[in-house]
Image: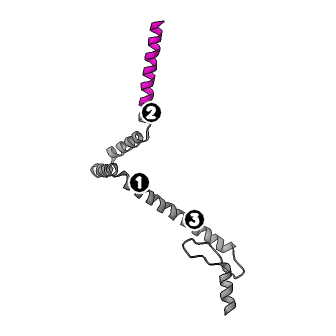
């Protein structure tokens, strides 16, 4: 009975070690390092790549802020492109009583609808 318990404990210890190694390999830093290592080995400019990677490791916060800014800029470009496409289709369909198409543009200042009427009645 004692031998059986010892074998079970050894099996559990080996299983715990295996699980720990798997978790280490599947962690985000490990996966990123593995991907970067593969790219480094296949990159023709590996010295430049190593220098850039070293800079990223030394300055993670500025790199994160730059990446967030670039992501926001790309999202904004895609959103504006979709808005323009929607505006073109809205010009074809939505025509107000004045005969002009009305499309919302967040970059332009908004005007109250009754402000245009007040100007027209003063003339």
Q: Main secondary structure of the magenta part?
A: helix
Label 1: state its secondary structure. Answer: helix
Check disc 3 and report its element: helix, strand or loop. helix
Label 1 Cα neighbours within 10 Å, binned few <14 / some 14-19 / many ≥20:
few
Q: Residue at x 72, y 80 (%)?
A: 97
| N-terminal label among 2 and 1 | 2
Residue indicated by mark 3? 82
The correct choice, above or below, for 111 with respect to 68 in the image is: below
Q: Quadrant of residue 119?
A: bottom right
Viewport quadrant of the C terminus: bottom right
**In the image, is residue 118 part of the stretch drawn in magenta?**
no
Give the foreground label among 3 and 2: 2
Depth check: 41 or 50 in front? 50
Q: Which residue is mark 2?
A: 23
Residue 92 pos. (x, y %): 66, 74
Whether residue 35 is situated above or below residue 93 in the rendered picture: above
Q: Which residues are magenta?
A: 1-21
Query: On the image, numbered disc 1 is attached to which residue?
Result: 64
- State the residue lying farthest toward the bottom: 123
The tag earlier along the polypeptide, 1 or 3, is 1
């Amino acid at each position: 009975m004692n031998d059986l318990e010892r074998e079970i404990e050894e099996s559990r210890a080996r299983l715990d070690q295996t699980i720990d190694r798997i978790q280490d390999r599947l962690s985000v830093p490990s996966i990123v390092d593995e991907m970067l290592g593969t790219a480094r080995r296949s990159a023709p400019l590996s010295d430049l790549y190593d220098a850039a990677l070293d800079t990223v490791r030394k300055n993670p916060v500025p790199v994160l802020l730059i990446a967030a800014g670039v992501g926001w800029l790309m999202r904004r470009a895609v959103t504006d492109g979709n808005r323009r496409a929607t505006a073109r289709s809205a010009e074809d369909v939505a025509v107000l009583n004045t005969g002009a198409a009305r499309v919302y543009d967040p970059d332009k200042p908004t005007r109250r609808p009754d402000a245009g009427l007040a100007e027209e009645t003063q003339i």
